[in-house]
Image (cartoon, rainbow, N blue to C red):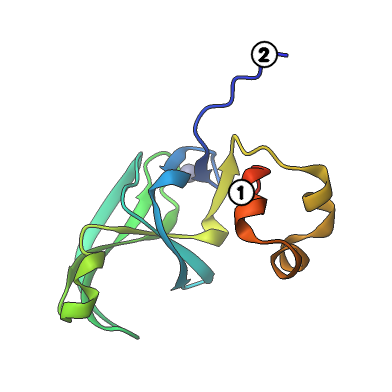
Amino acid sequence: MAESLGPRLYSCSNCRNRVSLHDDIISKSFQGRNGRAFLFSHAMNIVVGPKEDRHLLTGLHTVADIFCADCRKVLGWKYERAYEASQKYKEGKFILEKAMIVKENWKKNWFFQALGDETLHLLVPMSLVDWFGYWT
Ligand SMILES: [Zn+2]
């Protein structure tokens, strides 16, 4: 069976515009406005809004909201500048909120799907999960 799976992508949850690649994730342990958020080195098909200074948990940052280029929904924000030395690695990187994006091109193992995300993380080493093509 010829299966043509492209790279694993994330799309806008509202209009399915493709906004980022799984391979560009730097960290999955960020906090967004609506729960968990991912830090990406790149994002595509987005519009960057005006810059503003925000006091975040990790100090003062200059950030800009990012919008889906198709439907203009807010997806997260871009770190334009970090003032603390320890936070400099975020500069030029993108936060996409997990609640605002959906997976595309992800092969899901029926067993893991049935098990659910939370149980899965307790039971199965992530390297094994990734081997099966499943990731949360
Ligand atoms: Zn959209």
Question: Residue at the location (78% across, 50% down)?
Answer: 113
Q: Position of residue 91 (x, y in %)?
A: 20, 63
Residue corresponding to mark 2: 2
Marks 2, 1: nearer the viewer: 1
Of 104 and 5, which appears nearest the observer?
5
Question: Residue at the location (66% across, 47% down)?
Answer: 134
Q: Secondary structure at mark 2?
A: loop
**Which kind of residue does numbered mark 1 sit on?**
Asp
Residue 120: in sight, yes or no? yes
Of 68 and 62, which appears nearest the observer?
62
Any mark on residue 39, and which?
A: none
Q: Is residue 66 left or right of residue 2?
A: left
Q: Position of residue 85 (x, y in %)?
A: 16, 79
**The residue at label 1 has a CB less than 8 Å from ligand 1:** no
Q: Position of residue 57 (x, y in %)?
A: 35, 86
Please identify the residue farthest to the top as the structure is shown: 2
Image quadrant containing the C terminus: bottom right
Q: Quadrant of residue 40?
A: bottom left
Of 32 and 112, which appears nearest the observer?
112
Q: Are marks 2 and 1 in contact (CB under 8 Å)?
A: no
Mark 2 or mark 1: whose residue is earlier in sequence: 2
- Disc 2 versus disc 1: distance between alpha carbons? 21 Å
Residue 135: in sight, yes or no? no
Q: Is residue 62 left or right of residue 111?
A: left
Q: Secondary structure at mark 1?
A: helix
Mark 1 crowd level (few <14, some 14–19, many ≥20, 10 Å Cα): few
Q: Is residue 74 above or below residue 45?
A: below
Q: How many marks?
A: 2
Q: Quadrant of residue 83?
A: bottom left
Residue corresponding to mark 1: 130
